[in-house]
Image (cartoon, rainbow, N blue to C red):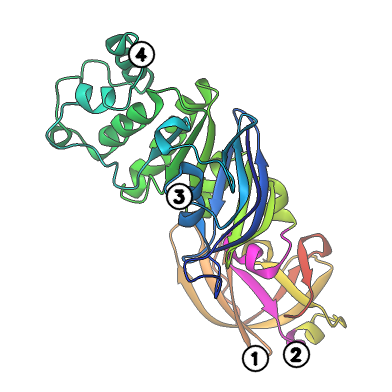
Amino acid sequence: MLTVKNVSKSFDKGKSYALKNISFTLEKGKSYSLVGESGSGKTTLIRLLCGLETPDEGVISLQEQIVTSDTIFITPEKRKIGLVFQDYALFPHLSVYENVVYGISTTGSKKKRVTEVLNLVGLNGFEKRYPHELSGGQQQRVALARALAPAPEVLILDEPFSNLDTSLKAQLRNEIFEIIKETNTTVIFVTHDTNDALAVSDEILVLHNGVLVQKESTEIIYRKPKNKYIASLFGKVYTFDDVTKSKFGINDPMEFCVRQEHLQLNSKNHYLTGAKILQRKFMGTYYAIILQVGKQKIVVAHPTDIKEDNCKLGFDKSVVFSFNKE
């Protein structure tokens, strides 16, 4: 579907690179998330895919047709790549119908296509309303309908849920991806929220300092990250210092890392040590138990309070990440 081969981009004539030698392939109808901290190259990559920037080197192909190379450049409007912006970018002076029809360049029945996509996003009957008359979730559906109206091969969602209330976010996120799945459109979901990425993606691409460091299924990314940076993107990870490792009976020069949710209290585990309880915080559905192990403070989520001043902290071999020291 979409192939990126050896793509690099610099904005200062090669002194530094926003993207360096990026290569990957995306399949038809699958959902992909693009994650990474600010400055990792996410925005630059989607601008290159859309044709809003040109790479210094490399080739981008869509449906086996080259859209960008040293000698070829297909303009953005001819790439069949749709884009839903973070702020939706709806025209405030245009109605819902006019906003959606704006993106359709074909000479066929535009009215029929608008009706189809508004039905798809659940906004049939909203044609005459204006953006200011809609809720945030409804505005997002209009933006989605506009992006889907030209039947793109690839749809890019650029941080589309960041402006929504937490209570609405998860529901709308799932509904939006169910709608897109029906169209068999390939999706690139740009997000800083890795929980969202895990919830809706078939695969996740992780960018770091302009380099694609891992592209795997959601389960492999979570369970088998290639380095500590990737592991830390998907939840709190503790890296044990040498003193703490010795208390667990670990004699290994590698960095030992464990996710917070895999730490257990007063259980039978392969690795086990005593810990001093410093503080307890009631968090509603669990207690945050703050522990001291050697020089390290560690927080463990526990279903009930622990009245003692000391406890056992443990984890199993299967949940350990072991990385070379950086």
Q: Identify the residue position indicated by label 4 in the image.
A: 116
Compared to residue 42, the image places residue 39 above or below, namely: below
Question: Residue 295 has which mark?
Answer: 1
Q: Earlier in the sequence, mark 3 or mark 1?
A: 3
Assess disc 2: are there few (<14), some (14-19) or many (≥20) residues with their C-alpha within 10 Å of its C-alpha. some
Callout 3: SS: helix
Q: Are marks 1 and 2 in contact (CB under 8 Å)?
A: yes
Between 196 and 189, the one nearer to me in the picture: 189
Q: Position of residue 187 (x, y in %)?
A: 52, 36
Q: Identify the residue position indicated by label 3 in the image.
A: 47
Please state which amino acid type lies under the numbered disc 1. Lys
Callout 2: SS: helix
Compared to residue 282, the image places residue 164 above or below, namely: above
Residue at mark 3 to residue at mark 2: CA–CA distance: 47 Å
Residue beneath the point at 34% across and 26% down: 145
Q: Identify the residue position indicated by label 2 in the image.
A: 243
Q: Is residue 234 magenta?
A: yes
Residue 104 visible to an observer of this rendering: yes
Assess disc 4: are there few (<14), some (14-19) or many (≥20) residues with their C-alpha within 10 Å of its C-alpha. some
Residue 265 visible to an observer of this rendering: no
